[in-house]
Amino acid sequence: MRNLLGILIAFAVVLTAACGTSPNPAKLNSLGPDAPQRVVIDDLGKSVVIPENVNRTVSLAPNLTEIVFAVGAGDKLVGDTTYCNYPPEAQRIPKVGDTLKPNIETIVALKPEVVFVSTASQLETFIATLTEQKIAVFVTNPDSLDGIYSSIEKIGAVFKSETSPRLIAELKERIGAVERKTTGADRPKVFLQLDKSLFTIGRGSYLTDLIRRAGGESATSDVEKAYTQLSKETALAIDPEIIVLSESSDNDAPADVFRNSRAVRNGRVYRINADLISRPGPRVADALEQLAAALHPEIFKK
C-alpha cells in the first residue's frame, strides 16, 4: 500500500514540469529523413511524433500497461514497471524500475519508440533525457471516466488498434447500465480511504467521478486537489455514511478517527481491491459495478 500511496501522491503533482517541457515535434523521434512518421496528441495537448507503425514501447504505470494489453498491443511492450501485475503476461515483461523511480538507462537500452507515462512520472529531467535519446514520450492524465475513455482511444491510436473502439463501447454500456439503475436513488456520502493516514481523493480525481456514477457523493468532492491527506479534525467532521477502503494489507480497516462515524456504527464499510479501484484503465467498469453494489444493495442484489 505504501507503493500505491507513493504513486497516488505523485498523481497530485501539478503538471508544471511536464508542460514546461514541450519539445518541438520535428525534433522528436528522429528516425531519418525517409522513415515514415505521424503525429498523435497526448493528454497534455502535446504533439508527439511517432513511427508510422509502433513496435517497441515501454509503460511506466500499471494502468497504462493494462490499456496497452486491452487494445491488443501487449506484444509491443518491451518494458514495464515492477507494479505492473495485470494481465499475468505483464509480469513476464522486463522491468525498468517503479513508476516513481524508473531506471532511465534500462529504458534507453530497450530502444523503445514510445514511452507511456502517467502524471506520476512527470519529471522534467525524465522527459528531457528521453527526448534527447529521440524517444517519444506520451502522457496520459485522466481525471474522470470520460478521461479514461480518451486515454484508451489515444493509446489505441498509437498502435492503430481496431480493438479500442469496441472496448470503449463496452465500458460505456456497462457504466451506463449502472447509472440508469441508480437514477433517482438516494446518494449516500462516501469517504474513500486510500490509506489509514487519511489519504483520500478530491475534486480532480477520476475516483470522485466513479463514486458519483455509482450512485454516491464523495465526502471530499469539495477538496481542490486530486489527492490529499486530511487532518483528523477534518475527517471527524465529515462523518461519512459509507466508507470504502482501497483494500491492501495495511489498509484493511477504517482509520481510528472514524470509529464513531455513521459508517462504522451502521456496518457500512466496504472493501475493493486496491489494484482494481486505483487504476484508471480498462477494469474501471469492474470497480464501478462493485462500488455500486456496495452503495445500493437494495438495487443490485435484487
Image: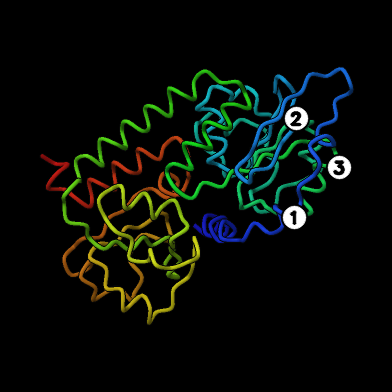
Q: Which residue is mark 2?
A: 113
Q: Secondary structure at mark 2?
A: loop
The residue nearer to you, when weighing 288 against 271, is 288
Which mark's residue is nearer the viewer, 2 or 1? 1
Left or right, 34 with respect to 163, comes to: right
Q: Mark 1 and mark 3 in contact (Cβ < 8 Å)?
A: no
* Residue drawn at the location 46% of the way across and 36% of the way down: 149
Q: Earlier in the sequence, mark 2 or mark 1?
A: 1
- Quarter assignment of residue 11: bottom right
Please report contact status of discs 2 and 1: CB closer than 8 Å, yes or no. no
> Most extreme residue toward the bottom, as rendered?
233
Taking the image as shown, residue 112 lies to the left or right of residue 1, namely: right
Q: Position of residue 299 (x, y in %)?
A: 14, 44
Q: Position of residue 289 (x, y in %)?
A: 29, 41
Q: Which residue is mark 3?
A: 132
Instruction: Give the structural element (helix, strand or loop) at label 1.
Output: loop
Residue type, label 1: Gly
Q: Which mark is residue 20?
A: 1
Q: Amino acid at mark 3?
A: Glu
Circle 3 Cα neighbour tier, 10 Å, few/some/many (<14 / 14–19 / ≥20): few
Question: How far across and down, in percent of the image, does residue 37 sit?
Answer: 76, 23
